[in-house]
């Protein structure tokens, strides 16, 4: 499914907005991009695609549903995917998709706190009609924000409600680094008008906004009005995504003309209300086939979801001679492999067992498939790609493999100390790093065999992770989408990508009940899994805020711990290495070598002490 998201031409999207600035009769309206000023301001310019996203007006003129356009320029697989998504009849994208608001320039915004609001209009209606949901209307606290050059971005740290319509507002009083208040968009000054406009398309939009100003805002807060609101827009979240069975149907349609003709009739969709159940149903069918262990060759049996067959996966044991009654599972990050667990053995004395994630280490192929965009011979290359169907299965496979291995471990099928007798540990712990934490969070949430867990540099919300990453390990993946950053195409691409991967996102799968046996370790200024993505993971885990770590005496209470600070960043892979070679994008902000080594020692000491007490 090459170049998954090169599907949306700007003309298709913008024509659906119903506003053509170049045709307005209002003589004073100018293109936002042509304004040359000495302060920042808001932009609403459909001609250039600079409008807030997500936004209901994107789909308003085409029935209100997300509609992806097929093209002869796209592969059959891509066109079939768009047809399948269109068949869902969703009115927006993932409840985890971030909000992007365009600015005139990149002057730094300095006073955004308290000047934005997010309201759930679906709950507002329920409150008015049935006196229910009244406490859930204001969902502003679900958002965190940052400025990305000439965009303000607001990321959900908790998923919004699926299938709900939202109203987002920016309020008067926002200032930029010049000390000046930011300028209201020219178009919004017309949308605020209480008098009809001569331009028909703009008048149609003004009427919709008049309803918001005159009916909705007063019911929310009398202080919200034309004078206090700088900008507002509505958007709707998806209530469905594609199911694994739908991806299978797309694949079958590639060789079955009968299905091609009636593909839409074969798309069932997956409701967000049962989004966590898809993996569980797959696991329930697969677990009976897994868990056998070959202690002589160090392999365990798993079930390959995508191929409907079992396979033996190699594992390694380090510090086995130290075994008494405790062992921990280590899971590596993207591009790593199981042998990295050995790097921890000098500071963490417990026995550690590890195996490779799908498409990593020993689980790559000997030859590359020229018909895919990833390299099957390179560790990690084919785990996270531009194909969301295979990506979702890779996440599911990782969780299933961990479940199978933990069951085997806890039931006494491994000979940990190599004395010829299988061992049944009293305590099984888990350490995940980066991607290992991302798949580890859902795994520990599903598996009662794990007594304690440490998630190092874990993240959630894939769209936020991809958008905020600065390191080439992740930015190269985003580049494969084939769209320019911070354009409508880019936002739609990530919105769709997140929607299709939501069933595997820790933001949706993790259970906060495991917070009482978990520690989250994060790196300040992380350029691979950003602190925003860390925060989503922490919220899903049940932690609201972090504590800075005392390197000399790290706390071993359950909680979220930050290594480093604004004057001394810590590299993403600090648990295993203090080498900063791989982080040129933040090299000037990182602490010196001694500082990073101290951070590493503190993280390992925290793990050792947490497991021992």
Image (cartoon, grey):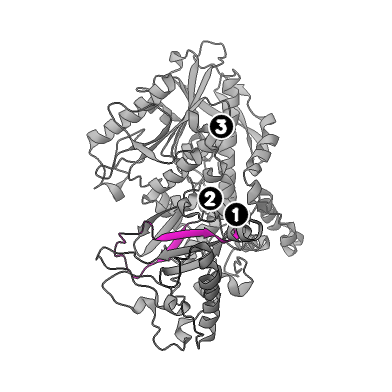
Secondary structure beneath label 2: loop
Image quarter hosting the C terminus: top left
Mark 1 lies on a secondary structure that is loop
Find residue 163 and report its image quarter: bottom right
**Alpha carbons under labels 1 and 3: distance apart:** 29 Å
Q: Which residue is mark 2?
A: 159
Q: Secondary structure under badge 3?
A: helix
Q: Is residue 75 above or below residue 143?
A: below
Visible in this render: residue 573? no
Spot the residue most to the right: 258
Q: In this image, 542 relative to 36: left or right?
A: right
Asked if residue 506 is among those painted magenta in the image, a careful observer would answer no
Taking the spot 49% from the left edge, 40% from the top edge, the residue there is 438
Q: Give the labeled residue for mark 1.
A: 162
Could you give the CA–CA distance between mark 1 and mark 2, rounded to whole angstroms?
8 Å
Residue 408 place in picture, x, y as percent: 60, 23
Where are the magenta residues, as a range?
98-122
* Mark sitting on residue 402: 3
């Amino acid at each position: 499914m090459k170049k998954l998201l090169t599907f949306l031409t700007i003309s298709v999207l913008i024509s659906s907005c119903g506003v053509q600035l170049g045709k307005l009769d209002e003589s004073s309206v100018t293109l936002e991009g042509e304004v040359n000023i000495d302060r920042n301001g808001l932009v609403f310019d459909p001609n250039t695609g600079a409008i807030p996203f997500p936004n209901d007006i994107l789909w308003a003129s085409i029935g209100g549903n997300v509609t992806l356009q097929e093209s002869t320029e796209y592969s059959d697989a891509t066109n079939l995917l768009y047809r399948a998504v269109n068949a869902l009849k969703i009115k927006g994208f993932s409840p985890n998709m971030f909000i992007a608001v365009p600015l005139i320039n990149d002057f730094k915004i300095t006073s955004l706190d308290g000047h934005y609001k997010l309201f759930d209009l679906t709950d507002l209606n329920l409150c008015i009609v049935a006196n229910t949901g009244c406490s859930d209307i204001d969902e502003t606290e679900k958002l965190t924000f940052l400025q990305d050059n000439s965009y303000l971005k607001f990321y959900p740290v908790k998923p919004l409600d699926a299938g709900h319509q939202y109203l987002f507002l920016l309020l008067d009083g926002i200032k930029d680094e010049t000390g000046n208040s930011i300028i209201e968009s020219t178009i919004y000054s017309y949308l605020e008008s209480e008098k009809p406009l001569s331009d028909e398309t703009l008048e149609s939009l003004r009427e919709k906004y008049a309803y918001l100003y005159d009916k909705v805002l007063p019911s929310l807060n009398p202080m919200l009005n034309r004078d206090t609101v700088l900008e507002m827009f509505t958007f709707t979240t998806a209530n469905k995504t594609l199911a694994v069975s739908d991806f299978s149907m797309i694949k079958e349609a590639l060789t079955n003309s009968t299905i091609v003709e009636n593909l839409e009739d074969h798309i069932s969709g997956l409701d967000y209300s049962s989004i966590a159940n898809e993996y569980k149903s797959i696991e329930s069918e697969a677990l009976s086939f897994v868990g056998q262990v070959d202690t002589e060759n160090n392999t365990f049996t798993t079930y390959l979801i995508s191929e409907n067959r079992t396979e033996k996966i190699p594992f390694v044991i380090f510090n086995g001679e130290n075994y008494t009654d405790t062992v921990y599972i280590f899971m590596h990050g993207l591009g790593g492999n199981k042998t990295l667990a050995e790097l921890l053995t000098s500071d963490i004395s417990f026995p550690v067992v590890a195996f490779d994630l799908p498409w990593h280490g020993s689980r790559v192929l000997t030859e590359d498939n020229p018909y895919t965009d990833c390299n099957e011979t390179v560790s990690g290359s084919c785990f996270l790609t531009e194909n969301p169907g295979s990506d979702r299965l890779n996440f599911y496979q990782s969780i299933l493999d961990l479940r199978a291995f933990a069951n085997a471990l806890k039931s006494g099928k491994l000979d940990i100390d190599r004395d010829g007798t299988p061992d049944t540990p009293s305590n099984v712990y888990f350490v995940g790093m980066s991607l290992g934490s991302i798949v580890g969070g859902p795994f520990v949430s599903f598996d009662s065999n794990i007594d304690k867990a440490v998630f190092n540099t874990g993240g959630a919300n894939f769209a936020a992770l991809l958008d905020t990453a600065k390191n080439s390990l992740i930015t190269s993946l985003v580049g494969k989408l084939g769209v320019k950053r911070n354009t409508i195409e880019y936002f739609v691409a990530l919105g769709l990508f997140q929607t299709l991967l939501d069933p595997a996102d820790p933001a949706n799968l993790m259970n906060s009940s495991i917070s009482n046996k978990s520690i989250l370790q994060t790196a300040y200024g992380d350029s691979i899994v950003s602190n925003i993505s860390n925060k989503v993971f922490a919220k899903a885990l049940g932690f609201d805020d972090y504590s800075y770590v005392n390197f000399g005496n790290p706390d071993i209470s359950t909680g979220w711990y930050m290594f480093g600070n604004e004057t001394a960043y810590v590299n993403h892979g600090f648990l295993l290495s203090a080498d900063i070679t791989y982080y040129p994008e933040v090299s000037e902000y990182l602490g010196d070598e001694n500082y990073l080594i101290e951070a590493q020692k503190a993280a390992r000491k925290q793990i050792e002490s947490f497991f021992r007490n």
